[in-house]
Amino acid sequence: MGAPPGGPAAAPGYGPGYGAGGWAAPQPPQPVMYESNEKPTAAGVLSIIGGIFILLGGAVVAAAGSYVSSLTGGAAGGAFVGLGALGVLLGILTLVFGIVLLTNPDNHIALGVLIIVFSLISWVTSIGGFFIGFLLALIGGILALVWKPSYEYQ
């Protein structure tokens, strides 16, 4: 297809910036994040603090199980050591997921679900991180689920 009679400047849509075909589709507005709301900070910080308490609760359960096992020599103490070790692992994972939530907020839904699930499991493994760890991680996971980034259209 050539230029219309009268040259390229005579017809709208022809000229610099319109490409070889002479026509450019209109571009939709591109979202741009506000700088102040680009991370779910409260969710991440609460999850990190809750993960620390869950980790400490798991360590206390493991230490108590070890002490009971050394006194009685039975399997009951060993079971508590295993539950405490699992509690320590859940605390570390909750802590890591809180850090990842702050560094990569695009995955806030999946991380929020994992934080909630691990905080619920912590009731069995580490006494819920002395209850405060469970509560903080649960609130952090819920905040991660409901967090929505603010967008501005150009």
Image (cartoon, rainbow, N blue to C red):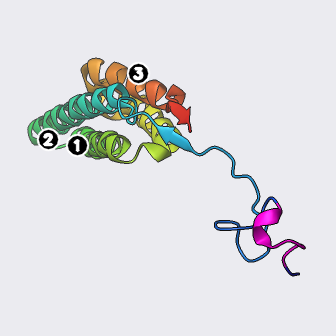
Task: Name the quadrant of the C terminus.
Answer: top right
Residue 47 higher or lower than 20, as above or below: above
Element on which disc 1 rests: helix
Element on which disc 3 rests: helix
Task: Name the quadrant of the N terminus.
Answer: bottom right
User: Which amino acid does the dot numbered 1 rest on?
Assistant: Val
Front position in the image: 60 or 146? 146
Residue occupying the point 69% across, 47% down: 28
Kindly identify which residue carries mark 2: 66
Which range is magenta? 3-11
| Alpha carbons under labels 3 and 2: distance apart | 32 Å
Mark 3 surroundings: few (<14), some (14-19) or many (≥20) residues within 10 A: many
Q: Position of residue 117 (x, y in %)?
A: 47, 35
Kindly identify which residue carries mark 1: 81
Q: Earlier in the sequence, mark 2 or mark 1?
A: 2
Element on which disc 2 rests: helix
**Residue 8 sits in which quadrant?**
bottom right
User: Which amino acid does the dot numbered 3 rest on?
Assistant: Ile
- Determine which of the numbered discs, if any, sits on residue 139 in the image: 3
User: Which amino acid does the dot numbered 2 rest on?
Assistant: Ser
**Mark 1 in CB contact with mark 3 (< 8 angstroms):** no
Q: Position of residue 32 (x, y in %)?
A: 50, 41
Residue occupying the point 29% across, 43% down: 99
Please indicate whether residue 140 sits to the left or right of residue 68 in the image: right
Q: Earlier in the sequence, mark 3 or mark 2?
A: 2
